[in-house]
Structure formats: C-alpha cells, structure tokens
Amino acid sequence: MKFVRLAVAAVALLAASGAQAQGKTQLLVYTALETDQLKAYEQGFYREHPGIEIRWVRDSTGVITARLLAEKANPQADAVMGVAASSLALLDSNGMLEPYAPLNLDAIMNKYRDSKNPPAWFGMDVWGATVCFNTVEAKKRNIPKPETWQDLTKPAYKGQVVMPNPASSGTGFFDVVAWLTLWGEKGGWEYMDKLHQNIAQYTHSGSKPCNQAAAGEFVVGISFEYRANSNKAKGAPIDLVFPKEGLGWDLEAFAIHKGTKKLEAARRLADWASSKNAMILYGKNFAITAQPGVAEPLPNIPKDYEQRLVKMDFKKVAESRARILAEWTKRYDAKSEPRK
Amino acid sequence: MAAVLGARAVARQRVHWTDRAGELMLAALAAALAAFLVAPLAAILLQSIEDARGRVIGLDNYFAYFETPALAHSLWNSVWVSLLVTALVVPAAFAFAYGLTRSCMPLKGVFRTVALTPLLAPSLLAAISFIYWFGNQGVLKEWMQALGIEQIYGAPGIVLAQAFSVFPHALMILITALSLADARLYEAADALGTGDARKFFTITLPGAKYGLASAAMVSFTLVITDFGIPKVIGGNFNVLATDVFKLVIGQQDFQKGAVVAVFLLAPALLTFVVDRMVQRKQTSMLSARAVPYAPRASRGFDAAITAYCSVVVLLMLAVFGMAVYASFVKFWPYDLSFSLRHYVLGLVDNEAGTAFGNSLKLAFATALAGTATVFAGAYLTEKLRGAAWLRATVQFLGLLPMAVPGLVLGLGYIFFFNAPDNPLNFLYHSMAILVACTVVHFYTTGQLTAVTALKALDAEFESVSASLKVPFWKTAWRVTLPICTPALVDISRYFFINAMTTISAVVFLYSPDTRLASIAILNLDEAGEPGAAAAVAVLIAATSLVVCILYLGLGWLVERRTQTWRKPA
C-alpha cells in the first residue's frame, strides 16, 4: 500500500515538474557550470527549498555573458550562478545586478566578494591558473617539467606551449593580468615577448590548452585548475603545475538579476549558494571556496595554492581590460602566423 | 525576338487578377523576411555606429577597426582561404554532380546519400576528425609532413575541413543545375557530328552557368563566415569570422563585432550582382517542347566517373569514420580500447530524450516551413511578371542569410525579439523562434536550388496558361511543382539535416524547454570531451541518416510518380 502511494506521489511529482509546476516557484538561472555540478548543486538546494524549481540555461562563460548583455533591454534570467566574477563585474557596471547581502555573507572572505555593501555579487569558489604538463610526450622529447612561469621561456619548450588568447578567453586574460601584476608593466610585457617565442597556439577557450595537453597534441597547456583536475581524473597522463611566482584567478560567482519578478525565491537561492552546505559541494570540485576552511584538500593541489594567487581587483582589471587587450593584440595577435 | 516582345506586351495588358494575388503573396513573404531577417540584422548591425552606452557615434568604430593591424591580416587570410576552397570544391562537386546526372553509374542513390554526410554533423566534427587524422598525434601526420606541410593547425586544416563541409552545399545546387537538360540539343549536336568535348563546352556548361555561379558564391560565402572550423583547427591563423567570435564572445564588444559582421555581408552583395548578370544571359534549358535528356551507357566514361565518385565517397567516409571510431575509443590517443563511455556521457549531458526530441521537432518544422517558404518565394520571384522591385527585393533578401554568421543572427534575434515593445515578443524563448531563425539561417541554399530548378523551365508554360486564363497556382500545382519535386525533396532534406546540427545561432535562443542536442556537441568539446562530442554528433547523424533513407524512398516514389516523362519513351 505504502509503495503504491509512493508511486502515485512520484507520478504526481513528475507531472507537476512540467511547464506549470503546482505552487512551485520557477527560477530561470543562467549558468556556466558543468552539467554534473549542476545536478549536485540543484539537489542540494532542493533538499532545503523544495518549493522552488530551478530551470537552467547553461553555456560557456562567453556565450552566457553575451546573452545576458544582449537581453539587457528585457531581462529573462532571475539569477546568474557559476559565472566568472569578471563577467558579473561587467554586468554590474551596466547596472544589471540586484545587490543583496545573503544570509551567510559574513562567512565569505572579503577578497572573494564584491566590495560594495550590499554586494552585487559574491564568489562561490576560485579557479586559478594551472599548467597541464603531458609527461608522456615530454619524455619522448626530453622536455623537463616546468616549475615556474620563467621556465616556460626556455628554448626547450619552443613550439610546445599552448595558452588561451586573452582576447577570446577570460582565463587567458587573467594570466596576462597576473604577469603584469607580478612584474609590472615593463617586466610583464618583456616576459610575454619571450613566452611568445615558444607559443604554438593561442586558443579561443580557456579549457582547450589543457585538453590539448591531455590529448598529447602539445606538451604544455596553460589552463585552469578544474579543467586540469578533471582531465587527470579521466586518465590523461598530465601533471599539474602551479607556477611559483604567482597565479591569476577568477571566481565562480553568484548574482541576482535586476528586475526579476521572483526576488524572494532568487534571494533564497543566494542564501543557499553562500551557505556552508553549498560550499561543501563546491569543495568537491574546487580547492578554494569563498568560505575558508570548508573544502577538503584535493589531490594534485599544493597546500600553499591559495597563497600563490596574485592580488586581483576585479573593478580595476575591468577598467584596464580594453587597454591591455589592445596592447596584447598589437604585439602578438596580428603576427601570430604558425611558426616553423 | 519581336514576336516574343509582342507576346509579352499582350500578356501584360491582360493581367489576370490572380497575378495580383501572387503579388500580394510575394508582399507577405517580403514582410516576413523583413521581420525575421532584416529587422534582427539591423538591430545588431546598427550597433556598429553606436558606442557601448548606445549613443550614436557615427563611423568611429569602423575607423578604430581599420587602424588595428589585425584587420588587413584577417581580411587577406579570409579571402584567400575562401577562394582556394571554392576553387577546389566547385570543380570537384561539378564532376560528382555530372556523374550523378549524366552517366549510367551504378548505385547513384548511395553515392548521393554518402556525399551528403558532411551535412549530417556540425562542421566542428570535421575539424575534430581532421585533428585525429593529421594532428600532432594524428594517424597520417607523417604523410602530411612528407608533402611539406609542417602542421595541420592553421590554413591547411581550415582548407581541408572547409572543403569537406562545403562540398554537399555546392553539390546540391549543381545536381539541380545538371539534371534538367533538353535532349534535342544533344541530338542535334550528334546529328552534326559534334565531338564530346565541344558538346560539353557549348551545351552542358552554358546550361549550368547559373548553377555554377551560385555554387561558387555559396562556397565562398560559407567558408568566409564559418567560425566553427577555424576556431578548432585554425591555430593562430586569424580570419574575419574568428575576429567576430573574439569580439562578441570573448570581449562582449557587440559594437566592433558588428563592424566585422558588416564586412562579411560584402560577398552577399557581390553574389546579388553576379546573380543578376548571369541571370540576364541564362536561357531556360527546358523549353515547353523539350525532350528530357537521358544518359546513355558509355563504358569508358561510366567507369571513370564511377571511380572518381568512389574516391570522393571514400574520403568522406574516412573523415566521418574517424569521428565514429574516436567516439568508441576510451581515451585518445593513450587508451584505444573499446568503450561506450562517451555515449553514456553524451546522453546524460543531453538528458537523453528531451534534447533529441526537441531537435527532431525543430528539424521537421524547419523542413516543412522552410521548403514551403523557399519554394513559394522562388516561384513568385521567377514566374510573376509584375512587381519587379518587389521580386528583386525578395531575391536579394534571400541571398543575405548565407553571409550572416550564425552568432550575429542569433544575437540580432535577441535584440529584436526580446525588445519589450516588440509585438512579436511573445515568440521569444519559444520553439517557433528557433524554427524561424533556422529557416532564415539556411534560406539561401534552398532559394538557389529552387531558382536553379525553376530557371530551367520555359516561361512559355506560364504564358500559355495565362492566355488560357488558368490561375498561376493551377499551373504551379499541375506543371511546375511536379517537375520540381526532386528539387523540393532535396531542399526539405537540406533544411532537416541542417536544423539537426545547427549550433551557432540557436545557442543564443534556446530556453530550458527547447534545449537542442546539437548544442551539447559544442559544450562537450569545450569540456575536453571530443570523444563524447563525436558520440553525440554520431547519434544525431544516425538519426538524420534514417530520415535521409526515408527521403531516398520518397525521392524514388516521387521520381516514379512525377518524372516518368524524363525517361525515353
């Protein structure tokens, strides 16, 4: 009897999850999270807020940001989750975000949230620069494992380094920002001049360099932590290198879209997304969460990873973006024919 | 000549009221194209004269773009690569189409279907497959290097992958161009003892002129606007289409992105001019008294053309086969054991049924709506006598879509249809908008195919029926449509397959309820799962292939029902 009742309930639930869920508030959330992460986070949220249903529009960071900006005149999304903080800062400067201080804001580290009060966005977790180093191909070519950014300018790596084009990819851009922060304007560009001599390709996505290293197309791919870890977990013969001088980084972040008709439900999602329970879920994929001390240590990640992150001011970076990209394009993109 | 002019003048005096109805239909079509093509396009292209805050600043964005050294580079790269691909593809596709229409080659249906395989998957798949063949871990990398090509990334990869994926587009137009021929011309030539070569250059080629010009323009424009292939296999080889991607997706700089998109429209303008020029000289191959041409067996020629077509088909199967192989391999290139992991992953990512269901819905709706619209448009522009400017407008609008990169079209749809004061706003986030966008996106090849088929028919059919006071739609239904059914079948199949695989425009328009299977391909490749991306592509291709086989059956039925007049008595 109990089973039958349960089955009936399940069917009813399924029917309700159609277009018009009975009594459930539907939130349209734009995201750049991975599909498997989405499912875990969604279930975590439903456990605490069964009255709200999330409907995802998922794509790469660039596409989602472009879509949100294009929809600015008549916004569709209620909230944005798991999209780069640099993108959210851009949306904020367009006046598109609804500031809100979620329940657990105090627990979130200052450097991982918008500095305004209440903040327009807050971070969920950090994705830092990571170098994927293919050990099998390196051995074939007798190439040593790099430890620092400077190592990558050595002649041994000629034609074997791939990095994202900063004009196409946020990951590529924070690498450039990190080098300029570490060595100043002059030193930073000098470094990139030397690195350019060894670059095989500037790719149009931040994941691609690590994917290419994982597939043995090139030996060294400058990419980011999550992609490196997931490729290694799949069995790719790669080592993860976190160059000692310092790492560029960005946040997966959360924001409420201005003009949402479901502000209350969006705030509940914000509260949950900033909670410890959510952070524990983020910590399964990322070594650094916005609340400190929550994430379990991940394999392949050094203990001082967080100390290696360079200082980032998202607002300032957003302001200097056009200038940096113009300089970068002038130096490397216009003459980036494949070298012999 | 005088007699013809006289007949025209007489016909014009007695404009049947049905012609007015035809003009109204044409006006309705023009209005639809204005709403679903011109307005969205204008919504995004006008941004090229605005700044980021939406103020009109004139041509500053253009000047800023001219000053970047990247422009000259990308422009030159785009042009020469597109020209090279066109020069390779058009003769190759012409020979293939010639074999299919003018020889007694066996297994024509199979050849034709296999030649369409590049359409079955997004162009991305071709790029992935070429990396597996010729990449740094590629199976045939040494062969390539022996030919003096250092690496596949860059121009070589782009040319190869583009040639592969553009081939069927050119082929479709050329088959239509060659399949309608008047046997009397060849008989007369035979009677005069004309040699084969001379017959080819004086009868066959001039008859296919319009198709050849169209095929060349389509190839050129498709290559110059595609960003999927250069993005994956282009390495550091900058082209205009990747510049649009960098500006719009990488930097969300819609204004400068729109500037580049404006440049990409240039080939469409050129196509329109060339189209007009060729049209003036083209005479219809199939006069009302025509006797359909039937190829005669010729052992040497048939063997040679069969061999050629077999080579082409084998190359296509090699490209596609590599993708299929990769989809079943555990971890390329380090663990080549068999695994279904990619299929599981691909299906899970797609939430199994829903996305495939949506894709099928989209494809069927696009095939129906697209074929009807395209054919109605082509018929009215070709066969109506009045409303010259309206006909020219519709014709020109039909040529525009192929020059618009998908991502520009998609963003234009957002700007236009999502605007709060747009009465069509209710379409936004619906399946209907995906259908409209996809029909518009693939309109050009459909139109060119339909026009090529219609051009071959003598206007005398219409003149005769007009003088007998038969409404034009009766003539269309009883004469024109049956003669054109093979082309119609081709067009609807073309819409169907492309709707199954389209990514670049719809990625901006789908909602949680209208997720499409093809979008997962891009996302899986991005996530470092080219195998799973290939797996989803293979599943989509398999679905399309089943539909293609149904089409093959349909084509055979249609052939028997409507084309028996082509067979020698």
Image: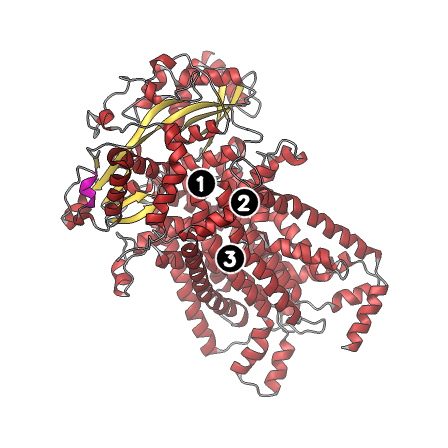
Chain at tag 3: B
> To which residue does mark 2 refer?
B48
A198 left or right, relative to B242: left
Viewer-proximal residue among A221 and B341 = A221
- Tell me residue A26's x, y (percent): 53, 21
* Residue B221 circle label: 3
- Identify the magenta region: A149-153
Crowd band around label 2 with a 10 angstrom C-alpha radius: few (<14), some (14–19), many (20+)? many
Is residue A73 something that shows in the picture? yes
Local secondary structure at mark 3 = helix
Single out the mark in the foreground, 2 or 1: 2
Is residue A12 something that shows in the picture? no
The residue under the point 67% across, 46% down is B32
Q: How far apart, in angstroms, are the residues tagged by discs 3 and 2?
A: 21 Å
> To which residue does mark 1 refer?
B249
Check the image and name the residue furthest to the front: A186
Chain at tag 1: B
Snapshot quadrant of residue A39: top left
Indicate the amino acid at tag 2. Ser
